């Protein structure tokens, strides 16, 4: 029986993947463990580099299925660990964190997952700067129960088996939140430690270039996709309370509906200009930055548009097998693609 599986999800991470794999191998060195690269059909040298290490490498066959939720679930199809860690291809894992997380899962049977501090190594854009500020406001000493483990975490296989699947393949984002909501609905706890879990080498691109990347990658569909997942998983109330962008996206539609209605009754041009400028002014004052205020409001509008599209998108069964192929096997034999994680666990 394997103690720990580390799944590294990748898409064009040739610049970072070697360090990610080395850190994962170091983290499992003291355990009976495995490292699995779950690649979403990279077009650079990611797979070639990964094949140089004692890891298993599986590749997504259909590029149209590329989403944030696909990678973890693809790796889950092949992994055999009692505990499972999800690592991005641009992260370096801290072995000390893994030891502490395993200790918690070994002795606290009600805990489904353990996460830690994500150390951002780059602050090239406003999104990352905002993310760091939000974390610093929320950061507390010791450990605390949380809604989800953003940025990765170590999960208990038996908890994942109970909720049916690891990651919803339909989601362009919020796959960690969806998993957390499903686990909490079954009574499991998620624990966040103050300890550093990873160093994160995020996108080396400026604010507006990153925004275009988010648009073309489909990320702005994710709030609507999450709402659909919440409807299927019966946790709509949770998502409205806990995921700010969902009620915000709905609120943007309501705000403009009311503004257009008001424009019909008063001075149309002045009313619409005021409606357009007020959110930017409020956010600029709140963030003490005109650029960050403008960026925030533009993100709201893109998310609101994506929400409508995402809600209407057809969903694939999230527990269905993802078409893939094994291109490299580690010393341990990997499972056949048609085998389910539960059947592997039973064996």
Image (cartoon, grey):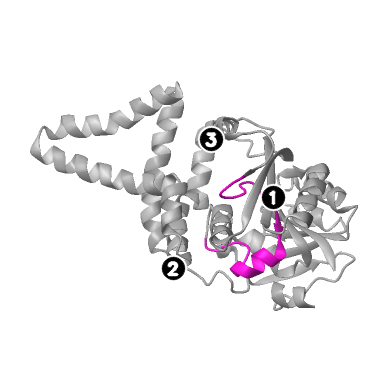
Magenta run includes residue 164: yes
- Disc 1 element: strand
Residue 237 image offset from top left, x and y in percent: 41, 56
Residue at 45 percent across and 67 percent down: it is 232
Q: Which circle marks residue 114 in the picture?
A: 1
Residue 128 lies in quadrant: top right
Residue at which label 2 appears: 314
- Disc 2 element: loop
Q: Residues within 10 Å of mark 1 (few under 14, many from 20)?
A: many
Q: Which is closer to the viewer, label 2 or label 1?
A: 1
Residue at 68 percent across and 47 percent down: it is 115
Residue at 87 percent across and 48 percent down: it is 26
Along the line of sight, which residue is nearer the eye, 53 or 92? 92
Magenta run includes residue 67: no
Along the line of sight, which residue is nearer the eye, 265 or 84? 84
Residues at marks 1 and 3, CA–CA distance in whole angstroms: 25 Å
Whether residue 309 sits left or right of residue 8 in the image: it is: left
Does 57 appear above or below 127? below
Closer to the N terminus: mark 2 or mark 1?
Answer: 1
Residues at marks 2 and 1, CA–CA distance in whole angstroms: 32 Å
Does 142 appear above or below 188? above
Residues at marks 2 and 3, CA–CA distance in whole angstroms: 29 Å
Whether residue 280 sits left or right of residue 235 in the image: it is: left
Q: Which is closer to the viewer, label 1 or label 3?
A: 1
Closer to the N terminus: mark 1 or mark 3?
Answer: 1
Does 128 appear above or below 321? above
Residue 94 image offset from top left, x and y in percent: 79, 42
Residue at which label 3 appears: 127
Residue at 71 percent across and 64 percent down: it is 157
């Amino acid at each position: 029986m394997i103690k720990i599986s580390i799944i590294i999800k990748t898409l064009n991470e040739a610049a970072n993947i070697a360090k990610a794999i080395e850190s994962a191998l170091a983290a499992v060195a003291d355990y009976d463990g495995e490292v699995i690269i779950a690649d979403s059909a990279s077009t650079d040298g990611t797979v070639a580099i990964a094949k140089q290490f004692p890891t298993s490498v599986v590749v997504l066959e259909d590029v149209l299925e590329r989403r944030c939720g696909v990678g973890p679930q693809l790796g889950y199809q092949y992994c055999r660990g009692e505990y499972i860690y999800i690592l991005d291809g641009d992260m370096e894992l801290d072995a000390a964190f893994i030891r502490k997380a395993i200790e918690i899962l070994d002795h606290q049977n009600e805990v489904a997952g353990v996460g830690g501090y994500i150390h951002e190594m780059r602050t090239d854009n406003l999104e990352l700067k905002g993310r760091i500020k939000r974390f610093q406001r929320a950061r507390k000493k010791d450990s605390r129960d949380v809604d989800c483990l953003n940025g990765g975490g170590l999960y208990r296989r038996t908890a994942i088996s109970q909720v049916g699947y690891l990651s919803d393949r339909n989601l362009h984002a919020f796959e960690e939140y969806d998993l957390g909501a499903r686990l909490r609905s079954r009574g499991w706890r998620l624990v966040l430690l103050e300890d550093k879990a990873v160093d994160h080498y995020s996108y080396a691109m400026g604010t507006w270039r990153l925004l275009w990347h988010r648009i073309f990658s489909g990320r702005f569909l994710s709030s609507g996709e999450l709402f659909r997942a919440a409807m299927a998983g019966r946790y709509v109330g949770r998502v409205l309370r806990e995921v700010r962008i969902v009620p915000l996206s709905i609120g943007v539609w309501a705000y403009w509906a009311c503004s257009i209605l008001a424009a019909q009754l008063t001075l149309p041009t002045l009313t619409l200009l005021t409606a357009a400028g007020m959110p930017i002014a409020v956010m600029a004052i709140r963030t003490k930055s005109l650029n960050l205020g403008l960026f925030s409001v533009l993100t709201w509008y893109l998310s609101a548009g994506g929400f409508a599209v995402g809600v209407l998108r057809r969903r694939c069964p999230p527990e269905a097998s993802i078409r893939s192929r094994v291109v490299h096997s580690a010393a341990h034999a990997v499972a056949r693609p048609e085998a389910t994680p539960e059947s592997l666990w039973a064996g």
